[in-house]
């Protein structure tokens, strides 16, 4: 029984002479089989009807087919476009003829005449309405090239004859996967469906039918809300390289997120399944710089289970989100269509940024792979900037921290970690030989880079200056630094602690946004590395706190008082007669009244004495120094080990 799911829908098909009879029959018969009503239309030049002939080109065997005729009585200038669910411009040279204009052409009006040829104007009106699905097979995209803004940033496929025109119009040529039969080659970009030739007419109809029945969401060009909508269930996005991640740097924080009940989504640059670096699941692997094994038996077992797609854990890495399908690519600066491409990119970027609303935080996993496809990946940078603008925690481990150094607003061109305190793979940990990448599961690429292509420590030192700092903490068992919204882990043994700090930061961020009072997060302040602040309003008090203090860092670069503590306080003895900090990560001794002081002090210390305004001003001028702290966290085997590092 024919599918009647398109019953009541009208389809407009633009035709002219030199049409392909088999293509037109495919539209008439296949759309009709789905219940749609097909209207053939063209430019009739003021006549009640027009007659058009088919192509006279010989076939592959040299046979010239007989001429066929189409009688058309609908002029597209006299129809209401809103009555149609879809518009198709016929393939072959019909669109070349449809671009004709009888107007006189001069140097001054040439572009305007081309844009306003009746058929080009009609198709432009259809393109401006995302509710109308457009089909542009083979040469039909020639109807859009007079208005290149319509194609800027759109993914299309076409006849090779049209390729140069599409590239000049800013379109993104997107061939189908290798091996796709010609009759199945179709590319769908929201409301625009294209194919490279009329042989794929049936596939074009089917793809258009799917878009009519399941309309694509309209492109959102309004700015995202200042405070993104937060769902009841907490969710974290984990970004992984497709060229090898270090096993523990994934399963370490992932185990903490799972224990906290977080939902997890995985993302890779192109949607391919990520693979662990083989030596990261080998307990006997002797790390060259450290001259000792760095992977325990229990951690290796967890990595092996995660890397195996046949296990329950391993299946979680199947079908990760494709960052290339999510975020647009910033146009190449030297592109001849850079302006149009940049406008299209910015329109699509606003829509892509809305995709982070459901996430509480993002984590970039380290390893050698990020060097290849994450660190200098502009889509990764845009993802990070979206989380930054939304005031959400951003975690990064090991060589994944380099992504933060290179992410920057393209107007200011300053790193987002300028003025921040971070950690990352220190120079003492870098290999002199053996930096390798994973080609497929359990298989290294046949390429040994030797040492890393850059010293991450040097990059982070330069990116954080002035006002910030890189802390390698070489010789300490662990190094994790929180300088909100950034949570950075130095290397493999810091993975569990990184996950724990991210949980605390995301919990505190939610508390600021919904538990303490109404939170308003203004746009990012990118100049000079000054990022966003959280304005907290409650019934009891109203004050500004630095985002780092809001998420558990002990003090903010802009809002903190360096205070002199009494002897008892320096010993860590709480004074019960003073208000205690409401720092969500370091709440201080139990029994406090919950009032918040804008201060900086160590976890477990009581609130400091009040100081005169003059002393406060003087101490604010002093350089900010990291405050050492010691925390305990259970390792993979269940035991406790001291984790000394810094919390900024």
Image: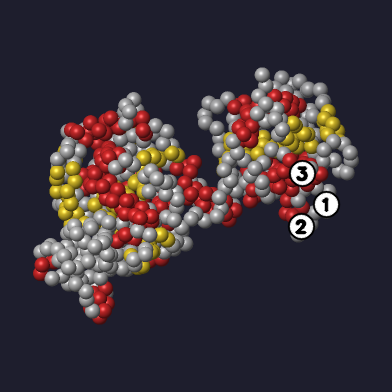
**Tag 2, which secondary structure?**
loop
Looking at the image, which residue is at 74% across and 55% down?
Answer: 112
Which residue is the site of mark 3? 80
Looking at the image, which residue is at 74% across and 31% down?
Answer: 37
Q: Which mark is residue 109?
A: 2
Quadrant where the N terminus sits is top right
Which residue is the site of mark 1? 103
* Mark 2 crowdedness (10 Å alpha carbons): few <14, some 14-19, many ≥20: few
Whole-percent x, y for residue 562 in the image:
22, 70
Residue 429 visible at all: yes
Eye-nearest disc, 3 or 2: 3
Q: Nearer the viewer, residue 330 or 234?
A: 234
Q: Is the residue under label 2 in contact with that under label 3 (CB below 8 Å)?
A: no
Q: How many marks?
A: 3
Whole-percent x, y for residue 114 in the image:
74, 50
Looking at the image, tell me whether mark 1 or mark 2 is earlier in sequence order. Answer: 1
Side (left or right) of 489 relative to 223: left
**Tag 1, which secondary structure?**
loop
Looking at the image, which residue is at 32% across and 31% down?
Answer: 313
Q: Is residue 296 above or below residue 100?
A: above
Quadrant where the C terminus sits is bottom left
Q: CA distance from mark 3 to mark 2?
A: 28 Å
Q: Nearer the viewer, residue 444 or 304?
A: 304
Q: Is residue 645 above or below residue 182?
A: below
Whole-percent x, y for residue 448 in the image:
29, 38
Q: Is the residue under label 2 in contact with that under label 1 (CB below 8 Å)?
A: yes
Eye-nearest disc, 1 or 3: 3
Looking at the image, tell me whether mark 1 or mark 3 is earlier in sequence order. Answer: 3
Side (left or right) of 194 relative to 89: left
């Amino acid at each position: 029984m024919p599918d009647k799911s398109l019953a009541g829908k009208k389809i407009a098909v633009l035709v002219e002479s030199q049409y392909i009879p088999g293509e037109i029959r495919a539209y008439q018969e296949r759309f009709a089989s789905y219940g749609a009503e097909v209207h053939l239309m063209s430019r009739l030049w003021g006549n009640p009807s027009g007659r058009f002939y088919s192509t006279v080109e010989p076939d592959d065997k040299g046979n010239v087919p007989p001429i066929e005729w189409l009688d058309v009585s609908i002029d597209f200038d006299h129809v209401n476009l809103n009555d149609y669910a879809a518009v198709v411009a016929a393939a072959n040279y019909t669109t070349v003829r449809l671009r004709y204009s009888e107007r006189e052409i001069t140097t001054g009006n040439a572009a305007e005449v081309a844009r306003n040829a009746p058929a080009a104007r009609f198709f432009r009106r259809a393109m401006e309405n995302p509710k109308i699905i457009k089909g542009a097979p083979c040469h039909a995209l020639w109807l859009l090239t007079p208005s290149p803004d319509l194609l800027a940033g759109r993914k299309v496929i076409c006849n090779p004859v049209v390729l140069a025109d599409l590239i000049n119009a800013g379109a993104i040529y997107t061939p189908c996967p290798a091996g796709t039969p010609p009759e199945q080659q179709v590319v769908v970009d929201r409301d625009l469906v294209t194919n490279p030739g009329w042989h794929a007419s049936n596939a074009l109809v089917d793809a258009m039918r799917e878009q009519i029945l399941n309309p694509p969401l309209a492109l959102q060009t309004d700015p995202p809300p200042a405070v993104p909508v937060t769902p009841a269930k907490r969710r974290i996005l984990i970004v992984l390289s497709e060229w090898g991640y270090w096993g523990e740097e994934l399963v370490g924080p992932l185990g903490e997120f799972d224990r906290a009940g977080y939902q997890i989504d995985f993302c890779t640059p192109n949607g391919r399944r990520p693979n662990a670096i083989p030596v990261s699941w080998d307990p006997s692997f002797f790390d060259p710089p450290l001259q000792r094994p760095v992977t325990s038996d229990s951690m290796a077992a967890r990595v092996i289970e995660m890397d195996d797609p046949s296990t329950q854990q391993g299946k979680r890495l199947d079908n990760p989100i494709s960052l290339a399908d999510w975020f647009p690519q910033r146009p190449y600066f030297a592109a001849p269509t850079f302006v149009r491409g940049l406008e299209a990119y910015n329109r699509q970027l606003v829509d892509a940024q809305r995709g982070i609303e459901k996430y509480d935080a993002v984590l970039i996993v380290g390893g050698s792979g990020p060097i290849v496809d994450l660190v200098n990946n502009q889509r990764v940078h845009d993802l990070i900037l979206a989380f930054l603008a939304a005031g959400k925690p951003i975690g990064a481990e090991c060589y994944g921290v380099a992504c933060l150094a290179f992410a920057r607003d393209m107007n200011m061109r300053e790193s987002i970690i300028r003025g921040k305190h971070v950690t990352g793979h220190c120079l003492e940990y870098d290999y002199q030989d053996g930096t390798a990448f994973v080609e497929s599961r359990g298989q290294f690429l046949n390429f040994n880079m030797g040492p890393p292509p850059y010293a991450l420590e040097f990059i982070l030192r330069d990116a954080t200056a002035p006002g910030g700092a890189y802390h390698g903490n070489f010789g300490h068992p662990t190094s994790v630094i929180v300088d909100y919204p950034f949570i950075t882990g130095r290397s493999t043994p810091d993975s569990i602690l990184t996950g724990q700090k991210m949980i605390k930061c995301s919990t505190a961020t939610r508390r600021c946004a919904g538990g303490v009072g109404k939170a308003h997060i203004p746009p990012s302040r990118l100049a000079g590395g000054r990022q966003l602040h959280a304005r907290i309003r409650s019934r009891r008090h109203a004050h500004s706190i630095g985002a780092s203090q809001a998420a558990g860092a002990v003090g903010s670069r802009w809002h903190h008082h360096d205070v002199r503590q009494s002897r008892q306080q320096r010993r860590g003895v709480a004074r019960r007669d003073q208000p205690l900090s409401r720092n969500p990560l370091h709440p201080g001794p139990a029994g406090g009244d919950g009032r918040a002081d804008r201060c900086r002090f160590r976890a477990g210390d009581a609130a400091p004495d009040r100081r005169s305004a003059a002393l406060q001003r003087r101490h604010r001028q002093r350089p900010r120094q990291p405050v050492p702290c010691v925390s305990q966290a259970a390792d993979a085997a269940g035991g406790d080990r001291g984790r000394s590092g810094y919390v900024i």
